[in-house]
Image (cartoon, rainbow, N blue to C red):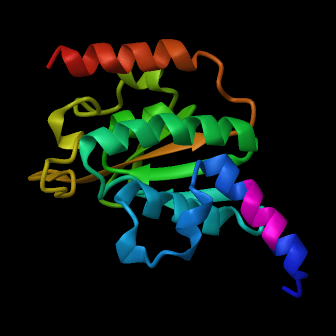
Amino acid sequence: LGWAQPRIDARLRELTDLTNFPQDALTRFPAELSGGQRQRVGLMRALMLDPDALLLDEPLGALDPMVRFDLQTELREIFDTLEKTVVLVTHDLFEAAHFGDDIVLMRDGSIEQRAPMDTLMSAPATPLPLSAAWRRGPDHEAACSDDGCRRAIGIRRPGGSAGHHDRIQEIHRIRSSR
C-alpha cells in the first residue's frame, strides 16, 4: 500500500482504542491471546484499510457464552461508531437481530425471507424462524435439521439503529420464554 510507518502506527492506535485492545498485547503471539482478544485482532485487521463495508462470517461463533455476550454489546457500539454497512452471517437468528436492522433468512443457500426482526416475528415466511433450529448448540454444531441448514444474515447500515433497544428487549423476552 505504500503507507508510511507513522500513518500505520496512527491507524493501529485508532483501532486499538476503538476495539479496547490493550496496546501491550500487540506484541503477543496468537496463542497468548484470549478468544475475545483474537476476535478484536480480526476486527482490527478487517478495518485497517477503512473499507466501506464489512462482511463478518460467524465472528463470535467460537467464543464461550459470557465472552460472546460481552463482545456482542461491544461490537454493536463499534458498528454504531464506524457508520459503515455491516453484513453479519451467523446460525444464530438472535445474534443477527442484535446486529442487523434487516435480517435475511436462508435455508440451504436460498433466501427464505428478508425483513426487519419484528416482521419476521409477526409474519414469518416459514414456521421456523424462531425455533431452536436457528440456534447453535454448545458444541457449535451448525443450525441444521432434517429440513435443511439455516443461516441468518444481519444487515446494518449507517444510522440504522432506530428501534434497537425495543428489538433487543423483545429478543431477551423470547429467549427467556423458552
User: Outermost residue, front direction?
Assistant: 24
Residue that appears at 56% across and 36% down: 76
Q: Is residue 175 visible?
A: yes
Image position of 77 (left or right of 93): right
Residue 97 found in image quarter: top left
From what the image shows, is residue 116 above or below residue 22? above
The location of residue 66, given as percent across then percent down, is 29, 39
Image position of 77 (left or right of 137): right
Q: Is residue 114 visible?
A: no
Image position of 101 (left or right of 138): right
The location of residue 92, given as percent across then percent down, is 31, 43
Residue that appears at 26% across and 29% down: 130
From what the image shows, is residue 43 above or below residue 81? below
The location of residue 24, given as percent across then percent down, is 57, 64
Residue sitting nearer the eye, 39 or 32? 32
Residue sitting nearer the eye, 44 or 25? 25
Residue that appears at 44% across and 20% down: 168
The location of residue 78, given as percent across then percent down, is 63, 41
Residue 156 found in image quarter: top right
Give, as a single range, the part of the protein colored magenta.
9-14
Question: How many dots with numbers?
Answer: 0
The N terminus lies in which quarter of the figure?
bottom right
Residue sitting nearer the eye, 148 or 65? 65
